[in-house]
Amino acid sequence: ERVRWPNGLSAEGARKVVENFKFKQNAAARAEKQASGAAPASSSAAPTASAAPSSTSRSAEEADGGDAEVHVEAFRCPITQQLMRDPMVTPSGHSYDGPAIRKVAQQMGFSPQTKRRLRSSELVPNRALRDAIEQTAALAAKLAAAGPVKAVEH
């Protein structure tokens, strides 16, 4: 069966629209779940401190294979829209989560962003990005363990 996309929308663009929609639905469901299960935060608490999940809930979420909290958008895989666990860089310099970009390279044979030919053998681990993700997660866990941040009056 032939699929017809709206004018100007490629199959890749439609996939991104669907993935973005699913991501927003999941984010809204998580926010609703968090709002119904969490006690109201005081007005003096910083928004980032009150919104950060505890390290135990984050560990449980990661163990289930769910999306851990993404603190920096550059850490989000453009394909899966989830936190990169094993970042890989393509010859064009774009970074993706390893399993996702390997699957794309094997099934489609081209880069999702540049549309150039791409083979799995051309992918290189992005160790600097992986270290940055790990360091940011460790810092977020420390901040969450420290409790809410109080506002300083001048």
Image (cartoon, grey):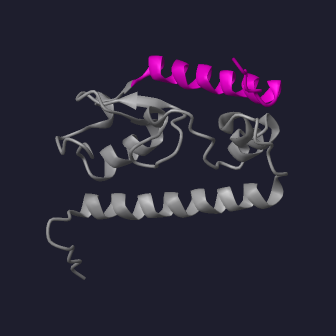
- Residue that appears at 27% across and 52% down: 108
- Residue that appears at 30% across and 64% down: 14
- Residue that appears at 50% across and 33% down: 72
- Residue that appears at 80% across and 42% down: 42
Q: Does the magenta-highlighted stretch encompass residue 111?
A: no
Task: Answer with left or right where residue 136 lies relative to residue 40.
Answer: left
Point out residue 151 in the picture as x, y percentages from the top left corner: 73, 26
Residue placed farthest to the right in the image? Answer: 39
The part of the image, by quadrant, that contains residue 43 is top right
The part of the image, by quadrant, that contains residue 124 is top left
Query: Which one is in front, 76 or 142?
Result: 142
Magenta highlight range: 125-154
Task: Answer with left or right where residue 50 lies relative to residue 78.
Answer: right
Q: Does the magenta-highlighted stretch encompass residue 126?
A: yes
Query: In the rendered view, would you say 36 is above or below 45?
Result: below
Query: Which one is in front, 63 or 21?
Result: 21
Query: In the rendered view, would you say 1 is above or below 112?
Result: below
